[in-house]
């Protein structure tokens, strides 16, 4: 980018709208001049903390489910395969709703507040179904389909909200919010392992559903998207140098050269590569979430180690998202993504080793690494998408990328149980480690669309 705008124009009379639209040499428009407080009435930090709280509330649906499976099986007469498929269907619909929800938001049909509100009631219904429906097919529809759709509406809305309000330094903020989706489940992991049985499961699950409803509704009340092309008033979108945090982040992660529609993003070839890499990586992550407690018990570790390993995974899964999000603003998004996928793959082989030698402390160490790698890639994809394709269509573009998780849910949970049955845990974990390395290879192919052409143009202009 050049240091000066190619064109700048006042978008409306100064009496009613105090902003300008700056167009860079690639044709990308930046709406500048309006502070966050002008639009929201308060700091945009609220658009980090409120999504974070909502993400913590819904995290129990995925990250604590594995700890509740034994009690649910005993209470309803389900097999282990039944409970794995319930979670797999939940993952399928939680991820699958991201693209249509993004499309509805960008068309103005569904506001962020409405998406959160609808999602909260669907989540409540999902937990009521898990609590009161013993027929496995009805439970799949109630929790897997309806509850999954509700969680997906909330998840996608929260993630896209952060990217829209922090276009200049989205890595750390996106990672922070995304982290809540993992470590928010920690209290429930221990509740399900120590205070959840066939005598109280109705009450516990019903209360969790109400908890999600209340928390998400309160957060939803304050949700609001920024205007299209909005850029922070105090940051120059065309600056190519500087010493501030935002300037350093923009140097490592330059803004998209223009705003790509979903069709244009697909045609670049980069969005399909992102999708495939996410499919493989998320499959490995979901496999670990689904089977770590069961594997720990199979090896002979006690319930404390089994619960602690899942607790460690959930905490580090969440904290790792925030840490890597912050690091990506310094290292660059692509390098950070490849790093965490490789760590995830190596951790799978480490889990096999710890189980083979019956080492509880090593098992917890590799649960730590698996949790780190198994969560940190999500905010990387969430931040890479607007970095590559812009913020205006981010809800739909990231919805397409994130839809890869619906495929991951099938082979990470349901098909994973078949691999465990056929090859045992060691064989399944070895396969998961290999899949991670393939995903890292695909991530290495990622390139920001149009950036090379911009560099060539700038080089020619200075020659």
Image (cartoon, grey):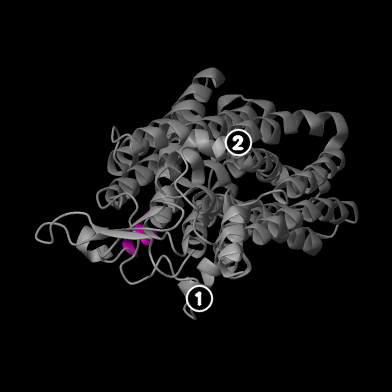
The image shows residue 73, relative to residue 329, as above or below, that is above
Label tally: 2
- Neighbours of disc 2 within 10 Å: few (<14), some (14-19), many (20+): many
Say which mark, if any, is on residue 404.
2
The image shows residue 84, relative to residue 196, as above or below, that is above
What residue appears at the point 77 percent right and 28 percent down from the top-left corner?
A: 418
Q: Earlier in the sequence, mark 1 or mark 2?
A: 1
Looking at the rendered structure, the secondary structure element under dot 2 is: helix
Residue lying at the far left of the rendered structure: 15
Observer-nearest of 144 and 359: 144
Quickly name the residue at label 1.
241
Percent position of residue 219, x then y: 31, 51
- Neighbours of disc 1 within 10 Å: few (<14), some (14-19), many (20+): few
Q: Which range of residues does the magenta coloring cover?
A: 45-51
Question: Is 240 positioned to the left or the right of 106 in the image?
Answer: right
In which image quadrant can residue 120 be found? Answer: top left
What residue appears at the point 46 percent right and 49 percent down from the top-left corner?
A: 258
Percent position of residue 176, x then y: 49, 61
Magenta region, main secondary structure: helix
What residue appears at the point 59 percent right and 68 percent down from the top-left corner?
A: 327
């Amino acid at each position: 980018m050049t240091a000066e705008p190619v064109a700048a124009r006042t978008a409306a009379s100064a009496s009613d709208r105090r902003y300008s639209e700056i167009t860079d040499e690639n044709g990308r428009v930046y709406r500048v001049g309006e502070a966050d407080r002008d639009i929201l009435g308060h700091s945009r930090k609220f658009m980090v903390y409120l999504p974070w709280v909502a993400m913590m509330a819904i995290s129990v649906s995925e990250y604590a489910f594995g700890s509740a499976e034994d009690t649910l099986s005993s209470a309803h007469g389900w097999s282990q395969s039944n409970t794995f498929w319930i979670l797999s269907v939940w993952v399928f619909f939680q991820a699958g709703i991201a693209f249509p929800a993004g499309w509805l938001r960008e068309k103005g049909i569904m506001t962020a507040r409405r998406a959160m509100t609808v999602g909260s009631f669907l989540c409540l219904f999902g937990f009521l179904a898990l609590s009161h429906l013993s027929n496995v097919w009805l439970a799949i529809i109630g929790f897997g389909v309806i509850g999954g759709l509700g969680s997906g509406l909330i998840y996608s809305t929260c993630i896209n909200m952060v990217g829209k309000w922090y276009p200049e330094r989205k890595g750390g903020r996106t990672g922070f919010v995304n982290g809540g989706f993992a470590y928010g489940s920690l209290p429930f992991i221990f509740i399900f392992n120590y205070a959840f049985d066939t005598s109280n499961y109705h009450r516990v699950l019903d209360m969790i559903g109400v908890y999600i409803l209340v928390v998400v509704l309160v957060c939803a009340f304050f949700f609001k998207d920024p205007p299209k092309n909005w850029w922070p008033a105090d940051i120059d979108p065309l600056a190519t140098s500087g010493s501030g945090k935002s300037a350093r982040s923009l140097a490592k992660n330059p803004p998209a050269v223009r705003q790509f529609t979903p069709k244009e993003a697909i045609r670049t070839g980069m969005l399909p590569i992102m999708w495939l890499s996410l499919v493989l990586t998320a499959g490995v992550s979901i496999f670990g979430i689904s089977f770590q407690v069961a594997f720990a018990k199979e090896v002979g570790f006690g319930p404390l180690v089994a619960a602690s390993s899942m607790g460690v995974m959930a905490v580090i899964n969440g904290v790792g998202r925030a840490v890597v999000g912050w690091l990506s603003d310094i290292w660059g998004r692509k390098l950070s993504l490849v790093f965490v996928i490789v760590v995830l793959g190596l951790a799978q082989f480490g889990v096999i080793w710890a189980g083979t030698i019956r080492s509880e402390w090593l098992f917890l160490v590799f649960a730590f690494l698996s949790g780190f790698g198994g969560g940190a890639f999500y905010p990387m994809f969430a931040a890479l998408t607007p970095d590559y394709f812009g913020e205006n269509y981010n809800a739909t573009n990231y919805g397409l990328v994130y839809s890869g998780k619906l495929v991951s849910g099938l082979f990470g949970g349901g098909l994973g149980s078949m691999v465990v049955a056929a090859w045992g845990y060691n064989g399944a974990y070895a396969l998961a480690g290999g899949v991670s390395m393939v995903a890292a290879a695909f991530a290495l192919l990622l390139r920001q669309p149009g950036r090379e052409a911009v560099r060539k143009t700038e080089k020619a202009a200075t020659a």
